[in-house]
Image (cartoon, rainbow, N blue to C red):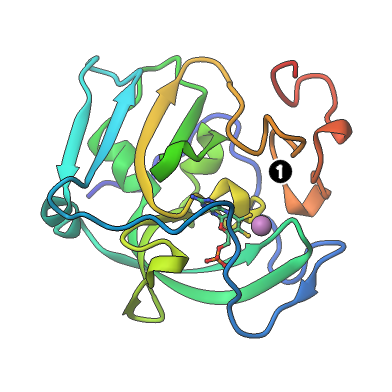
Amino acid sequence: MGQPTSREGDAPAPPGGLPPGQRLQRGWPVTHYGPVPKFRPERWEFRVFGATADGRSRAWKHEEFSALPHETVIADLHCVTKFSILGAEWGGVRAATILDMVPPAPDVTHVMVWAEYGYSANLRLSDFADPRSVLATHRSGELLTAEHGFPLRLVVPRLYAWKGPKWVRGVEYMTADRRGFWEERGYHNIGDPWREQRYSYQEEPGDGPEL
Ligand SMILES: Nc1nc2c(c(=O)[nH]1)N[C@H]1C(S)=C(S)[C@@H](COP(=O)(O)O)O[C@H]1N2
Ligand SMILES: [Mo]
């Protein structure tokens, strides 16, 4: 597998520790909107679609996805409701590995990560491509539980945790930015915890598409 590609617009890695306004959370609470979906292995697939380099989409059944290169990443989780979990160990497939396997077209700037029930989160390609962004199947060596996103969730430690959908089903490559579920409902389009980009009213020109 190739090195995680360095892409234009990559910001320097944020420092570890607690971002401003966050407090340390013990344990691992469950936070999400709506019901926990049932996993149906025969119907499940992970799809990469949209502006791929060759114009074709790609899909993996659960068994096939489980055979992809598995890596371990230490990554924090910062919920916009102000709790943070530090130093969690995630196992899964790096987002950068997906980008290597299904290269985006040269004009792709953003991705939309899609989950069950239509939950979605938009990310800049550079945030998705970060070497610590991981499509996680495991935490601390154990399979994720249903309420924490089994069989697959995205973890993007450089952004607030709503940018990491649980129950991920696909990634759409986009040549322009579009708002995801929470980004349409009052949360910041970029969502950098180190800059406390919590709410859409804090957005500055260029941070996102008009609401
Ligand atoms: N599909 C989906 N994923 C989601 C959410 C959601 O509502 N639906 N909430 C996000 C938010 S706001 C947080 S803080 C984390 C919480 O993950 P956890 O329940 O495993 O702690 O999941 C994120 N992923
Ligand atoms: Mo959250």
Question: What's the residue at 76%, 20% (across, down)?
Answer: 206
Residue tagged 1: 191
Position above or below: 149 against 164:
below
**Where is residue 50 shown, x and y percent of the image?**
35, 20
| Count of numbered labels shown in the rendering | 1
Mark 1 residue element: loop
**Where is residue 177 shown, x and y percent of the image?**
58, 21
Residue 63 position by quadrant: bottom left
Instruction: Please state which of residues 82 and 205 is positioned toward the viewer in this rendering.
Output: 82
Where is ligand 1, by quadrant?
A: bottom right
Left or right of residue 58: residue 11: right
- Amino acid at pointer 1: Gly
Position above or below: 78 against 64:
below
**Where is residue 191 shown, x and y percent of the image?**
71, 43
Question: What's the residue at 46%, 20% (across, down)?
Answer: 174
Left or right of residue 73: residue 123: right
**Where is residue 196 shown, x and y percent of the image?**
83, 50
Report whether residue 63 is seen: yes
Residue 211 position by quadrant: top right
Question: What's the residue at 77%, 69% (across, down)?
Answer: 18
Q: Residue furthest bottom?
A: 26
